[in-house]
Amino acid sequence: MRILIQRVRRASVTIGEQTHCAIGNGLLVLVGIEEADNDEDIAWLTGKLTKLRIFADESGVMNRSAEETGADILIVSQFTLYAQTKKGNRPSYIRAARPETAIPLYERFVESVERAMGHRIETGVFGADMQVELVNDGPVTIWIDSKNRE
């Protein structure tokens, strides 16, 4: 499982002409899922996401977590995080999980983050054609892969 975290001033998801959801200061999290992912990946990434110290403290130093600040979180599924570009110019998505595997894992990840944060998490719509708008704060953008725990 891979997540791309962006600290944002605001972010929203629009589907068609309708705003589906929006957040203020917090994190936009893009989630990619592969067939080999499981609940252990969810638990590890939930801990990393909610405890990662990327919000400023009173001295302006990135020393506070989403958990500590009660940050808004918007989680959006994104199978393209598993794009393979080694061969040719057309990305291959063969490593991305099929919907029957990915949807339950995505939903469990959202539920896990909600439990850790103690409040509702906004989400996109799995498989929908979404327009994601954001104002990156910093910018702070961090990539985490549960299979490469560096």
Image (tube, rainbow, N blue to C red):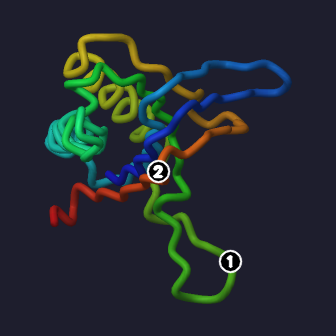
> For the point 44% across and 33% down, which residue is it?
103
Q: Is residue 143 above or below residue 51?
A: below
Q: Residue at x 37, y 50 (%)?
A: 3
Q: Secondary structure at mark 1?
A: loop
Q: Position of residue 27 (x, y in %)?
A: 42, 35
Q: Are marks 2 and 1 in contact (CB under 8 Å)?
A: no
Q: On the image, which quarter does residue 13 sit in?
A: top right
The amino acid type of the residue labelled 1 equals Arg
Between 106 and 75, the one nearer to me in the picture: 75
Residue labelled with disc 1? 90
Where residue 31 sits, quadrant-wise, is top left
The answer to which image quadrant residue 134 occupies is top right
Q: Residue at x 43, y 55 (%)?
A: 141
Image mark count:
2
Quadrant of the image containing the C terminus? bottom left
Q: Is residue 18 left or right of residue 57?
A: right
Q: Does residue 130 sit above or below 88 in this rendering?
A: above
Which one is in front, 15 or 126? 15
